């Protein structure tokens, strides 16, 4: 059975409460329960942390033993060379996801350190971006 890990970074634990006009009104845990039945032949795992080191440790822990990573690193997308290096170091392919259209927001959000290390990027499609990333990774 294929395994895919979804990683969410800082402040994404506040989905459903944080800026609902940008991020919607559902928690990620609620959304995850609608994702699982769409992929009955997939072990879908989830990890969220507000701490960069914890995100790095999780990528190191599973990145050689799973079939893919869906990563929304939140603000670390725009600042973390360390997360980019971790994605480069492991064998699992990754897809970068952003709930909002980062290119229509503040200029600092237009740059991602992760993009060159990922197979692709999905931005601005809301939570559906996670489903699309999973479908892509399953097809690899």
Image: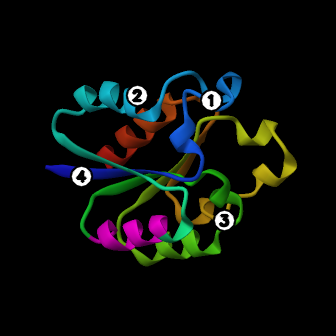
Q: Which residue is mark 3?
A: 113
**Residue at numbered disc 1:** 23
**What element does badge 2 sit on?**
helix
Q: Is residue 53 above or below residue 18?
A: below
Residue drawn at 48 percent across, 56 percent down: 49
| Gap between marks 1 and 3 measured at Cα | 22 Å
Q: Which mark is residue 31?
A: 2
Q: Toward the viewer: 18 or 98?
A: 18
Q: Quadrant of residue 89?
A: bottom left
Assess whether mark 3 and mark 2 are in contact (beta carbons under 8 angstroms).
no
Residue 87 drawn at (x, y percent): 48, 69
When the figure is inspected, residue 27 is found, relative to residue 8, above or below; the finding is above
For the residues labelled 4 and 2, the Cα–Cα distance comes to 18 Å
Looking at marks 2 and 3 on the same chain, the residue that comes earlier in the sequence is marked by 2
- Which of the two discs, 1 and 4, labels the residue nearer the N terminus? 4
Q: Looking at this view, name the residue that lies furthest to the right.
A: 107
Which numbered disc flags the more N-terminal residue, 4 or 3?
4
Q: Is residue 58 magenta?
A: yes
Query: Is residue 137 magenta-colored?
Result: no
At x 70%, y 65%, the residue is 79
Q: Nearer the viewer, mark 1 or mark 4?
A: 1
Label pair 1/3, CB-CB below 8 angstroms: no
Tell me which segment is drawn in magenta: 54-64
Under tag 3, what secondary structure?
loop
The residue singled out by tag 4 in the image is 3
Between disc 4 and disc 2, the foreground one is 2
Rendered location of residue 9, percent (x, y): 54, 53
Image position of 123 with respect to 46: above or below: above
Instruction: For the residues labelled 1 and 4, say whether their Cβ atoms are less than 8 Å apart.
Output: no
Query: Which residue shows up at 55% across the image and 56% down it?
Result: 50
């Amino acid at each position: 059975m294929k395994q895919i890990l979804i990683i969410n970074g800082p402040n994404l634990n506040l989905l459903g409460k944080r800026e609902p006009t940008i991020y919607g009104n559902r928690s990620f845990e609620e959304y995850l329960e609608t994702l699982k039945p769409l992929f009955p032949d997939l072990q879908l795992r989830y990890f969220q942390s507000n701490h960069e080191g914890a995100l790095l440790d999780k990528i190191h822990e599973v990145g050689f033993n799973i079939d893919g990573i869906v990563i929304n690193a939140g603000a670390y997308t725009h600042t973390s060379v360390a997360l980019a290096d971790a994605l480069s170091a492991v064998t699992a392919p990754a897809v970068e996801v952003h709930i909002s259209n980062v290119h229509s927001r503040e200029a600092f959000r237009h740059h991602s350190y992760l993009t060159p290390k990922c197979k692709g990027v999905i931005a601005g499609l809301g939570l559906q971006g996670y489903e699309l990333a999973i479908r892509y990774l399953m097809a690899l």
